Amino acid sequence: MTKEYTLKTIEQSDNVGLYSICINGNESEFEKFMTAFKQNATVSRDYQKIIFAIMKIVSDGALERFFRIEGKYSDNTAALAIDSKRLRLYCLRISNEILILGNGGIKTTATYEEDPILNGYVCDLQAFDSLLKKMQRNGKITIQKNIITNIDNIKMTL
């Protein structure tokens, strides 16, 4: 199945550019995450910790200490490192200044690979990370501090 990826700006501060991927013209993956868990009483504390962590990232930058490495060593996939065993938000930590927020969910298995939904979110981020790197190498986009340039109208297909 072919997927079309676009990138949406979520927040720009002096320290970080927050983005989220949109797949096949739908709302961003981060917006889907917020919609799914904002009113979920079983994980409300974890949700609030994630929102607080994002606010901290906006003010301080996407510093390595805020994340737990997920995925492969060859990609930028990470999860927000909150004191939670349940709710995960997956993202691409490109640098201290660029963070691409993905989707996530309630972790009920030992690893995300064992959960088809969470694994799908991570695979989408990994695919987008690969496309982003390719576009950087080809000069179609550039990353300058906290901004990904020329990304607004680009659609990437995989």
Image (tube, rainbow, N blue to C red):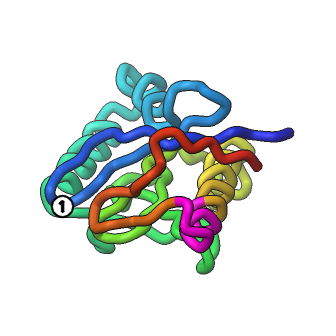
Residue 133 falls within the magenta-colored stretch: yes
Residue at 33% in and 49% down: 18
Whole-percent x and y of residue 86?
47, 47
Q: Position of residue 19 (x, y in %)?
A: 40, 46
Determine the residue positioned at 65% across, 59% down: 131
Q: For the point 86% across and 39% down, which residue is it?
A: 1
92 or 138, nearer to the observer: 138
Vertical arrangement, residue 142 with respect to residue 26, above or below: below
Find numbered disc 1 in the image and state the secondary structure of the residue it sits on.
loop
Q: Position of residue 38 (x, y in %)?
A: 36, 25
- Residue type marked 1: Asn
- Residue 152 in sight here: yes
Within 10 Å of disc 1 (Cα), the crowding (few <14, some 14-19, many 20+) is some
Prevailing SS of the magenta stretch: helix
Q: Which span of residues is magenta-colored?
A: 132-140
Q: Left of 32 or right of it: where is 112? A: right
Judging depth in this view, the residue of 27 and 39 nearest the camera is 27
Q: Position of residue 65 (x, y in %)?
A: 29, 72
Q: Tell me: 48 left or right of 22.
A: left
Residue with the mark numbered 1: 15
Q: Answer left or right for 40 relative to 132.
A: left
